[in-house]
Image: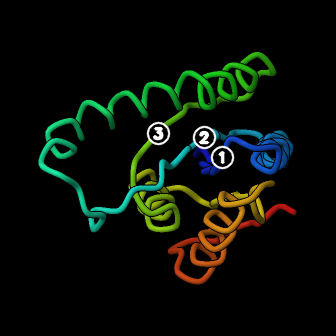
Amino acid sequence: MTTTLVVGLDGQGSGDRALAYAKRMAGLIGKCELLIVYVIEWSPYSFQTAEENAQRHKRREEEIATAMERIIDPAVKALKDDGVKAKGLVRHGDVADTLNAISVEENADQIIVSRSSEGGFAKRIFGSSTANLVMSASLPVTVVG
């Protein structure tokens, strides 16, 4: 049976530390797959103009493609180059809820995230998301400092 570890990346150095920890755990576990996830923070309750609503789907698809290209694909490639089984995923939504939902969908064994992002506004968003994830997750969460 393969152990699945979900790794939440934030596009910062703190996410790289979570990824390094997950890679080390995968090596210790043996038969393991890493699911690398980047969540684009999005709220269905934000107010949009009619024009913005018309462009929303296209904009979301562009954001997903950009995140895959800049964050997920390089991380997955580096892991595969090192012999680690990995795949990547980008979704829109609340970070804590989305990471938990993906982990449940994928029958993951553990979620690995960083304590917080390294700068400004993102630090406040992802930092609180980490706390929310720890408090509400359906499976064990490892928080890397």
Q: Identify the mark at residue 36; answer none if there is no mark.
A: 2
Residue in the picture at 48% in, 37% down: 89
Amino acid at the residue labelled 2: Ile
- How many marks overall? 3
Q: Identify the mark at residue 9; answer none if there is no mark.
A: 1
First-in-chain label (3 vs 1): 1
Q: Are marks 3 and 1 in contact (CB under 8 Å)?
A: no
Mark 3 sits on what residue? Answer: 90
Residue in the picture at 66% in, 60% down: 121
Q: Residues within 10 Å of mark 3 (few under 14, many from 20)?
A: some
Residue 92 placement (x, y as % from top left): 39, 49
Q: Where is residue 43, by image quadrant?
A: bottom left
Vertical placement of 56 versus 81: above or below? below
Could you give the CA–CA distance between mark 3 and mark 1, rounded to whole angstroms? 10 Å
Residue in the picture at 66% in, 57% down: 122
First-in-chain label (3 vs 2): 2
First-in-chain label (1 vs 2): 1
